[in-house]
Image: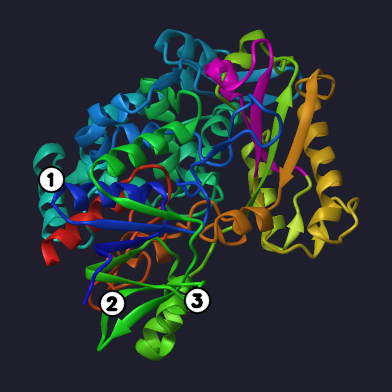
Amino acid sequence: MNYDADIIIIGAGHNSLTAALYLQQAGHKVLILEKADVSGGAAKTSDILEKGFKHDLYATNIGQFLGSRVYDDFKDQFHQNGFDIVAANQPFGNVFPDKKCIRVYTDPVKTIQEFERFSSKDARAWNDMIEYFTKVSPYLFPILQLPIPSLKMLFHFWKIYRGLGYREMLDLVRVLLTPTRQFLDERFESAEAKALLSPWAFHLGLSPDCAGGATFSLLESAADHLNGLALSKGGVGNLIQAMESVLKQGGTQFLMGTMVSDIVVKKGIAVGVKTADGHTYHAKKAVLGNVTPRQYVELVGQDQLAEKFVKRCKTYQFGPGTLMIHLTTDGPIKWDAAKDLTDTAYVHIAPYMSDISDTYSQIMKHQIPSDPLLVVAQQSKIDPDRAPEGKHVGWIQVRAFPQKITGDAAGKIKIGSWNDMKEPICNRVIEKIEQYAPNIKGIIRKAVVHTPQDLEKDDPNLVGGDMVGGTHHMHQFFFNRPVSGWSRYKTPIKRLYLTGQSTWPGCGMNAASGNLAAMQMLKDL
């Protein structure tokens, strides 16, 4: 038989590209098939509104990627192929009524002063939290880069035990399982300090009372304070293009605009893929799918799989959706609370932790949230290459949003088609920002709303607009991701593997799933 490649990869997201880099490095011929016209999955840059204005459509923060193994192993090649980094020394902040705000800087003195304005106790608690993060992060981050379950993970916990001691190790495990509200209530007293740190868990769809939320509030807030919030210069697409260029230079082939309709299985072994146009591509050694568990069943065919496994995949739980608003503006957003908020990478508007809880409750009822958390990203203030001189781009991420709508929590928006609701939803969002930045309406040149439905249409892995690849609640995390018993990237079909956000360690541009899937494949092949 004439083989088209040693390994065929479905999808060209950053985890697929990561896996391909290691497989290619090991001498395997790789073929990547991608439905879209460009690589990246949820990490794409486009001038969707005006020429010369570069928008990161979804993912923008690359801090986790810079700590990844693939960056450590291939960073010289990436930078030789056009990738560069810019970092915000004002990574994030929150605004509140009465022209109040609290900001985090990379400067520890300025950050402490922010907390001092609300509570001396909170200033000490922030310092304590950063000290704790510095102490445990050498043990914590490697957990997210190890296969689970595995002897390597077991040995790592032995290292934690040796390094921290028994009680400190148990305390770290407790943090990993603690809800955000509990974690913050134990440390901080002001509503503003709690509001500053709680949104990070909600980026993953975890409300303040969901187990495990504290992990993400701790990791992201501390890491951004210590390192700055990192962006890919000129757009996250430049990082993806650099990865793609390295692969092409090594011989990996890409077929863009190619939809895979079936995974070809013979005698329980994956031997290739079939595309929507009827063409079959043959893999000599393996197939790797950057797909969701539900898509996996559709591509393989449930007649090839055990009933219990099919049921688990079909009931794989996706989290709340996201609504995105992209803007081009004639100037920067001017925030009432502080002049330098315009230089902050992310401005969160909830305003308080209780508002996040209310939003979560409303979206669970499939209602348009009355007062949702807004994540206002001001990328071109950090990276001027993204817009013409004097102009700006940015996005507003509405976290979170129901995948299907049955009502409006505020009782003001008439329920209809997504297209019918875009304008009134956008108006609600802009009016909320206007309470804190009165110039917002006057500077907008153009705007576009991407609903949860639009997100899934652009990237089938963003099911219902869920940007994190499925809920990160404890029943679907760690060794339960994507399905208990199958968290090591293998599947019941021999030589067929999975990667992507629906696998361990979940969401974010951490490239860990791609690296770990490739390591498993190289071990098996």
Q: Which residue is mark 3?
A: 315
For the residues labelled 2 and 1, say whether their Cβ atoms are less than 8 Å apart. Answer: no
* Viewer-side label of 3, 2: 2
- Badge 3, how many Cα within 10 Å: few under 14, some, many 20+? few
Q: Which residue is mark 2?
A: 270
Q: Amino acid at mark 2?
A: Ala
Which numbered disc flags the more N-terminal residue, 3 or 2?
A: 2
* Viewer-side label of 1, 3: 3
**Measured from the top left, where is residue 432 in percent x and y?**
79, 33
- What number of labels is visible? 3
Question: What residue sits 42% from the left and 45% below the top?
Answer: 508
Question: What residue sits 54% from the left and 44% below the top?
Answer: 203
In the image, 92 versus 126, the foreground residue is 92
Which numbered disc flags the more N-terminal residue, 2 or 1?
A: 1
Which numbered disc flags the more N-terminal residue, 1 or 3?
A: 1
Marks 1 and 3 sit apart, C-alpha to C-alpha, by: 36 Å
Q: Which residue is mark 1?
A: 161
Q: What's drawn in magenta, residue-wise?
A: 371-398
**Where 107 falls versus 167 (above or below)?**
above
- Badge 1, how many Cα within 10 Å: few under 14, some, many 20+? some
